[in-house]
Image (spheres, rainbow, N blue to C red):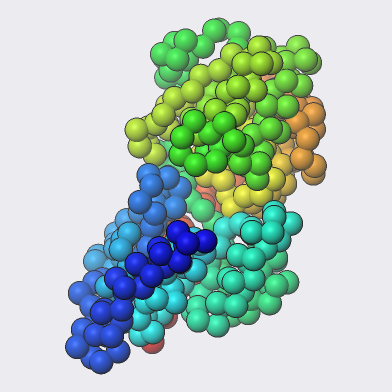
């Protein structure tokens, strides 16, 4: 509690001079019209903001900047990459800004702390010009909670379909050799952060379903599938420990950048989304674009993009056994059936290409706010 109070006091002290200067007309800002507030960590919130910035600036140069220091922003459109950052900063900043936040996931059932956070978010909605969400499930949830329809915009989380593409046979062979993957292994991907904090991650972040992923891998192994896990991302200690105890081999690598994930997808036979709650995730779209079949719980954008058995596999519950059974169905498809599924998935995910996502942010969110 004391740490939170001290942090808010420090942030308030940083913001106050600029807020006062803006209110008195002594300062009107030196920034592009749209400021997208990202996290310092090289992870999803940063990647989303940078892609939106780059795509809009191709259409309208010098329109969007990303920042991790919003305290000096005055008389601009300010888009927070998550509702958590909005609640941390928004009440401290200039009233002359027009505020937007992304809200990707969260519900009271996720825990008392999340419930209190959502109450605070809903109380802040009158100060927001727009709320951007990615998934139909979350859009409906926000409407049920009373977020005004006219403030709510659904735009998918994106994927670069020019970069994330199916591998050639030679590329697939090369990357599997690079990571020491045996010829007969069925490689099942999970590219996320699912441990608490940024250390080893031995304490699981259960909302991301690391326990469900391990259970699914155990069930696939018990069904006779020669599974091997391919993990990326920080804080994967809980999953690695579970796989070791189950005698399931795994690869764990750290991509140096978002685009370094490309070759990781080329090694996969299947991608599993085991989360209990999601906004996307990005791995869903990147797998579909890379011709990797996806089996997912019914969270985030999964129900928007996956038609069960047609463009991937979708389960209704949150058990590893369900995911394993669905995985077995996809893996047992004939070559022609598997090829059709990959083609349909590749076509379905084009609605989330970053070029479409960037243009949608400009046309549906920023354009009219800049004119106000």
Q: Quadrant of the C terminus?
A: bottom left
Above or below residue 254? Residue 369 is below
**Residue 341 visible in the displayed image:** no
Count of labels in the image = 0
Q: Residue furthest top?
A: 183
Tell me if I can see residue 24 in this picture.
yes
- Percent coordinates x, y for residue 331 in the rendering: 70, 22
Q: Is residue 54 above or below residue 119?
A: above
The answer to whether residue 259 is above or below residue 118 is above
Query: Most extreme residue toward the front, as rendered?
Result: 2
Identity of the residue drawn at 72% across and 27% down: 216
x then y, percent, for residue 232: 48, 30
Residue found at the far bottom of this picture: 24
Q: In this view, does 155 lie to the left or right of 244?
A: left
Q: In this view, does 34 lie to the left or right of 199?
A: left
Residue lying at 45% horizontally and 15% vertically, measured from the top left:
179
Residue 195 vs residue 44: left or right?
A: right
Residue at the location (72% across, 36% down)?
313
Quarter of the image for residue 136 reads: bottom right
For the residue pair 288 and 150, the one nearer the viewer reads as 150
Residue 170: percent from the left, percent from the top? Answer: 43, 15
Q: Where is residue 50 in the image (x, y as percent from the top left)?
A: 35, 54
Residue occupying image coordinates x 79% and y 16% = 223
């Amino acid at each position: 509690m004391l740490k939170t109070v001290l942090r808010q006091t420090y942030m308030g002290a940083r913001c106050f001079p600029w807020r006062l200067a803006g209110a008195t007309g002594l300062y009107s800002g030196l920034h592009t019209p749209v400021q997208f507030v990202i996290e310092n960590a090289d992870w999803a919130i940063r990647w989303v903001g940078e892609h939106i910035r780059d795509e809009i600036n191709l259409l309208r140069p010098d329109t969007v900047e990303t920042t991790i220091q919003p305290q000096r922003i005055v008389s601009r459109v300010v888009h927070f990459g998550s509702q958590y950052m909005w609640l941390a900063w928004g009440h401290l900043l200039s009233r002359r800004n027009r505020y937007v936040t992304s809200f990707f996931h969260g519900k009271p059932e996720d825990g008392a702390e999340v419930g209190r956070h959502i109450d605070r978010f809903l109380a802040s909605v009158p100060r927001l010009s727009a709320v951007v969400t990615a998934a139909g499930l979350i859009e409906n949830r926000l409407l049920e909670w009373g977020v005004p329809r006219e403030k709510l915009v659904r735009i998918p989380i994106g994927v670069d379909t020019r970069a994330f593409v199916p591998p050639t046979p030679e590329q697939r062979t090369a990357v599997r050799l690079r990571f020491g993957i045996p010829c007969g292994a069925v490689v099942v991907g999970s590219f996320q952060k699912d441990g608490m904090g940024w250390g080893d991650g031995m304490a699981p972040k259960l909302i991301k379903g690391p326990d469900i992923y391990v259970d699914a891998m155990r069930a696939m192994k018990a069904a006779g599938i020669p599974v091997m896990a391919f993990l990326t991302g920080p804080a994967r200690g809980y999953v690695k420990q579970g796989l070791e105890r189950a005698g399931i081999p795994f690869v764990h690598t750290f991509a140096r950048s978002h685009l370094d994930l490309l070759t990781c997808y080329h090694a996969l036979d299947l991608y599993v989304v085991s989360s209990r709650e999601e906004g996307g995730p990005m791995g869903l779209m990147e797998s579909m674009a890379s011709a990797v079949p996806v089996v997912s719980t019914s969270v985030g954008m999964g129900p928007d993009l996956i038609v069960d058995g047609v463009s991937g596999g979708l389960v209704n519950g949150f058990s590893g056994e369900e995911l394993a059974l669905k995985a077995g169905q996809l893996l047992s498809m004939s070559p022609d059936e598997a090829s059709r599924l990959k083609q349909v998935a590749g076509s379905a995910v084009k609605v989330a290409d970053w070029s479409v996502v960037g243009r949608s942010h400009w046309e549906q969110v920023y354009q009219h706010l800049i004119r106000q």
